[in-house]
Amino acid sequence: MMKKILFLVALSFVVLGCKNEKTEEKPAVEKEEIAINYQTFGDKITDENVLTKTEMIDKYKDLKPGDTVTVKFAATVKDVCQKKGCWMNLEMGEQEAMVRFKDYGFFMPKDIAGQEIIVNGKAYVEEMSVEDQRHYAEDGGKSAEEIAAITETKRTLAFEADGVLIPEVEK
């Protein structure tokens, strides 16, 4: 009888021991981070604490001529000055933001239209004269008819960038 009890106890240890060995802990799901390399223009900036285009549009709505706000946001490039890259327009919903570069200290590549970039600097609104609008239209490669059609000053979204990040395209 004692042998049977010892056999049952030993068997229960084996069964319980095997059961413990077979329990597997599921590995914790790790958040995968994708590193993006950037070309930096102007001051060195990071891709942290970047506002979305929608958040930036809300900030622009609150600005009056003469107001400025220092921000960093991401948006898609609509077009770039084709003479030397000295300005660019960013898509901002129904409008676009005209970006110039602090002290003309740096310029953009002319072929970045359609890319999402990050800009850092001062946002403001301005009343752009007909003359300035025509100048920028000419630099942007607009036709004579499009340039001639500009006849009124326009409230524009403006931005003076001190730093820009452009994602590097893998080749």
Image (tube, rainbow, N blue to C red):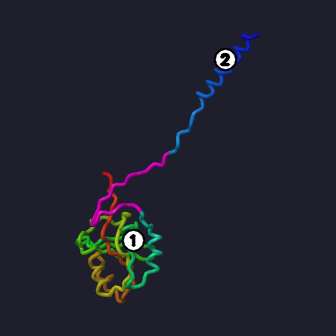
Q: Of 88 and 34, which appears nearest the observer?
A: 34
Q: Give the vertical position of 16 relative to 58 (above or below).
A: above
108 vs 27: above or below: below
Residue drawn 29% across the image and 87% down it: 131
Q: Residue furthest front?
A: 2
Would you identify the image quadrant in which residue 48 lies?
Answer: bottom left
Q: Kindly indicate the quadrant of the structure image that contains residue 22.
A: top right
Going by the image, does 95 lie left or right of 109?
right
Disc 2 marks a residue whose amino acid type is Ala
Which label's residue is closer to the chain start, 2 or 1? 2
In the shown orientation, is residue 153 left or right of residue 24?
left
Name the residue rendered at 72%, 10% in the picture: 3
Q: How far across and down, in percent of the image, does residue 136 sit?
A: 29, 79
Q: Nearer the viewer, residue 74 or 132?
A: 74
The stretch in magenta equals 30-48
Please provide percent x and percent y for residue 114: 37, 65
As for residue 75 lying within the magenta part, the answer is no
Q: Position of residue 6 (x, y in %)?
A: 70, 14
In the drawing, does residue 121 fall left or right of residue 23? left
> Which SS does the magenta portion mostly show?
loop
Circle 1: residue type: Val
Residue assigned mark 1: 71
Residue situated in front as seen by the camera: 117 or 44:
44
Q: Residue furthest right?
A: 1
Q: Quadrant of residue 13?
A: top right
Q: Say which mark, if any, is on residue 10.
A: 2
Q: Report whether 22 appears left or right of 82.
A: right
Q: CA distance from mark 2 to mark 1?
A: 71 Å
SS at badge 2: helix
